[in-house]
Image (cartoon, grey):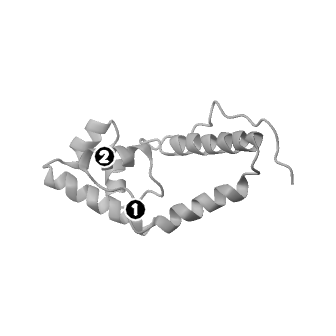
Amino acid sequence: MYDDSIRVGRHLKSAVKVAGQSQKAVAKAFGVSQPWISRIFNGHFGDRTDLVMRLCEEYGVEPYAHNDSTEFDDLANRLRELWDGTPAGAKRLRALLNAVIEINRCNGDAEGDQARPPTNVRATSRPKA
């Protein structure tokens, strides 16, 4: 659990309360269980799942802290370190990022079902050491 997740969860909880809605009503509207909404409101999520982003958009909550631009800069620097500068390297890196996105979607299953393996992910070649 991250401090920013706690911030987002609290802001979502407050926004839902101001809107006069219950956790059960929000869960029904978003097609998930009430305990899942409760976990989000308590900051028990590690990243910005599709559900969290949709909730933030619906209730006007900023999903990212404004003072975390260094995190984005660090991420950009890490991507530059990974990319070898070639079009083939960019394609491999894009495939890797798409695989991570798919894994996150599988792990973000709202009902807590076991994660399904990505169906459209395949390795094309191994990076050179």
Spatial distance from mark 2 to mark 1, Cα to Cα?
A: 15 Å
Would you say 76 lies left or right of 43 here?
right
At horizontal 27% and vertical 55% (from top left) the residue drawn is 12
Q: Secondary structure at mark 1?
A: helix
In this rendering, is residue 26 above or below 2?
A: above
Percent from the top left, x then y, of residue 47?
Answer: 47, 55
At horizontal 14% and vertical 54% (from top left) the residue drawn is 18
Q: Secondary structure at mark 2?
A: helix
At horizontal 62% and vertical 37% (from top left) the residue drawn is 117
In this rendering, is residue 80 above or below 23?
A: below
Percent from the top left, x then y, of residue 36?
Answer: 36, 48
Nearest-to-viewer mark from 2 and 1 = 2
Residue at numbered disc 1:
5
Percent from the top left, x then y, of residue 40?
Answer: 36, 54
Residue furthest right as drawn: 129
Classify 10 Å Cα crowding around label 2: few (below 14), some (14-19), many (20 and above): few
- Residue kind at label 2, given as amino acid type: Glu
In the picture, the quarter occupied by the N terminus is: bottom left
Would you say 61 lies left or right of 63 here?
left
Residue at numbered disc 2:
57
Would you say 104 lies left or right of 31 here?
right
Residue furthest top as drawn: 120
Query: Which residue occupies the foreground of this view, 58 or 6?
Result: 58
